[in-house]
Amino acid sequence: MAVARYDTLAMSVRQLGSRLANAIDRKVSAAIEASSLATGLVQNGDGTVIVNTALPSGASAAATAEGLGKEMIESIYAAVAEFHTLDVFDEIYIATTPKYFQYLPQALPIISSDYTANNGGLDIGDVKMVGGATVFQTNNMPTTTGLIMLAFTKEAAGMVKLWDVVTSINDQPEFLDAKLINSYFSNGVGALRPQCPCSIKKV
């Protein structure tokens, strides 16, 4: 008789680590958005918000995926220009949800210009950069009404860590050698330089 064995312990450890990593991502994205709204911090510029009602689900939203993608591209370029105006020339990142990210590779400027230039395209459904900014999709965006994208550099928010994500496995002999898995982290996140993030919204 054949017996199949499955390593459920490794799966549980992986799921715990992933859950905590997502919690940290949500804290960071919330701090980046808060930084984009901050004003009056000593020796720092004010945060930036770009509103484009033609973005997805906006009051003047385009009628096609191609049109929505083009509006997102225009907003990204506007955010990059705003950073450069404020003398922020560090590497820029653009975060958005998979729901909105899908429109970017369907926009004709990206397809016609980058189909064979290692910047994504219709064939793989991906876009790596727009306007010199690295674009990525995440499920850990803030749930603020109207928020479509976050543009930021690495100085937008700061983190102080007491412990990184730590996972330990302890035997429990009193429970027939059951395994007790502990996973935890300790950190604080807050706005750092308000001129380094930008909220891109539909309202």
Image (cartoon, rainbow, N blue to C red):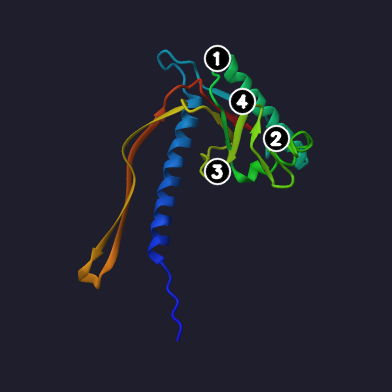
Q: Secondary structure at mark 1?
A: loop
**Label 2 to label 1, Cα distance in Å?**
32 Å
Judging by the rendered image, the residue that carries numbered circle 3 is 138
Disc 2 marks a residue whose amino acid type is Ala
- Image-based side of 93 in relation to 18, left or right: right
Question: What's the residue at 65%, 41% (across, down)?
Answer: 101
The residue where tag 1 is placed is 87
Label 2 sits on residue: 59
Q: Amino acid at mark 1?
A: Asp
Q: Which mark is residue 50?
A: 4
Towards the viewer: 63 or 3: 3
Crowding around mark 4 (Cα neighbors within 10 Å: few <14, some 14 to 19, many 20+) is: some
Image quadrant occupied by the C terminus: top right
For the residues carrying marks 2 and 1, which lies nearer the camera in this image?
1
Give residue 73's position: percent from left, percent from top. 69, 31
Question: In the rendered view, would you say 12 is above or below 36?
Answer: below
